[in-house]
Image (cartoon, helix red, strand yellow):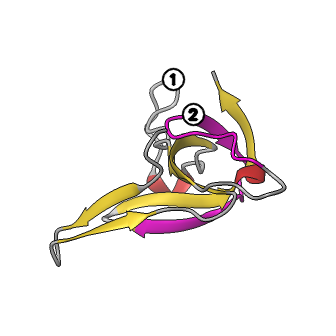
Amino acid sequence: MAEKLLKTHNPKNNKTMNIKPLADRVLILPAKAEEKTVGGIIIPDTAKEKPLKGEVVAVGNGTKDEEMVLKVGDQVLYGKYSGTEIEVADEKYLIMRQSDVLAVLG
């Protein structure tokens, strides 16, 4: 069984922190926003679209009503306003319910 924890190291206080989503929640690392258009125009930070896909980095155990079908490493699509943004060690993540994930990319 794959490890379901996100281990992070905080250089400020030299401590390692584990994040394990509870129940049917998953932790997702969003894909980076596009820097350029197809035509080569550079997009400023204020005009960038929020990415709608990312990689699952940690998963909960599921609930008695809903088993966890996502696994660490899955590339997924999610809704524009899904999840809660958290920042760990200068990296932004989204934590959301498995039901907020729209699709798994193959």
Near mark 1 (Cα within 10 A), the count class, few <14, some 14-19 or many ≥20, is few
Q: Horizontal placement of 44 versus 79: left or right?
A: left
What is the C-alpha distance between the residues marked 1 and 2?
Answer: 27 Å
How many numbered circles are shown?
A: 2
Mark before the other along the chain sequence, 1 or 2: 1
Amino acid type of the residue tagged 1 in the rendering: Gly
Determine the residue positioned at 43% across, 55% down: 5
Q: Quadrant of the C terminus?
A: top right
Give the secondary structure at mark 2. strand
Near mark 2 (Cα within 10 A), the count class, few <14, some 14-19 or many ≥20, is many
Above-or-below relation of 75 to 17: above
Q: Which residues are magenta?
A: 67-87
Q: Horizontal placement of 51 versus 99: left or right?
A: left
Give the secondary structure at mark 1. loop
Above-or-below relation of 42 to 12: above
Amino acid type of the residue tagged 2 in the rendering: Gln
Q: Residue 38: x percent and y percent? A: 52, 23
Mark seen at residue 75: 2
Q: Horizontal placement of 49 versus 57: left or right?
A: right
Residue 17 sits inside the magenta stretch: no
Q: Which residue is mark 1?
A: 39
